[in-house]
Image (cartoon, rainbow, N blue to C red):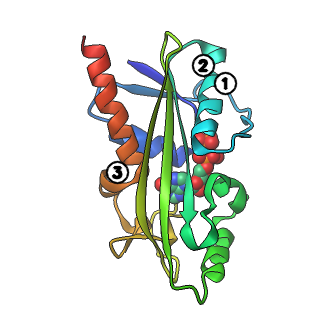
Amino acid sequence: MKIILATHNDKKLEEIRFLFVDTDIEFTSLKELGLNEEIEENGKTFKENAYIKASYIHNLYKLPVISDDSGLEVHALNNEPGIYSARYANGNYDLAMDKIIKRLEGKDDRSADFNCSICFIDEEDNVYYFERKCYGEIGYEKAEGRAFGYDPIFYYQGKSFATLSLSEKNKISHRGLAFKDFYDFIIKKYKK
Ligand code: ITT
């Protein structure tokens, strides 16, 4: 089965394809469709933004589409950057992570979560959502390793996400869990 993955983020694409590598679900990327335009994410929640991305692409192609809206919520910072995670970084994650570490100076609460909201629209225009969080802490420094977004400062059970392999991260991450829920759903839906 082919599903369009409505993202311009190559790191998301890599994680999601890795999750489904042994299945017969294939994700077509926007790059492969030759679609470069940015989709304006003007929703107020992750869920709304996930719908905005999926429905925009679904209206263009009338094919099954899935989108992922995700971000980092730092609890002592009123859950910022939240839905603005990509915009907060404005392309420079090094600076954005330094800014978060600085803003947490002197605060005892370093808890944070990554949220992932998925919106799937099928060939009959039915809309489904899958949402998961992964709880962890913001470290005092950026860890070396795989550099995807805020991974270097997000610590799960004492280990930075940046130091985990893709398969280790997928087992516990917001995205890994939400896409696993989606997988369980899709298997049931098309088995009938
Ligand atoms: P698309 O909208 O095209 O999918 P995007 O990067 O703009 O790509 P979002 O609007 O969902 O995606 O922004 C999410 C940002 O949150 C993303 O750019 C990362 O910086 C951060 N983020 C989400 N999941 C993450 C993860 O697993 N590890 C590190 N950072 C993550």
Q: Mark 2 or mark 3, which is nearer the start of the sequence?
A: 2
**Where does the image place residue 56, in percent across and percent down from the top left?**
67, 24
| Residue hosting label 3 | 170
The numbered disc on residue 139 is none
Judged from the image, the secondary structure of the residue bearing numbered disc 2 is helix
Q: Residue at x 62, y 44 (%)?
A: 45
The numbered disc on residue 56 is 1
- Residue 62, compared with residue 79, is above or below; it is above
Q: CA distance from mark 1 to mark 2?
A: 6 Å
Image quarter in which the C terminus is found: top left
Q: The residue under label 1 is which amino acid type? A: Tyr
| Residue hosting label 2 | 58
Q: The residue under label 2 is which amino acid type? A: His
Q: The residue under label 3 is which amino acid type? A: Asn
Q: Is residue 148 visible?
A: no
**Where does the image place residue 6, in percent across and percent down from the top left?**
57, 31
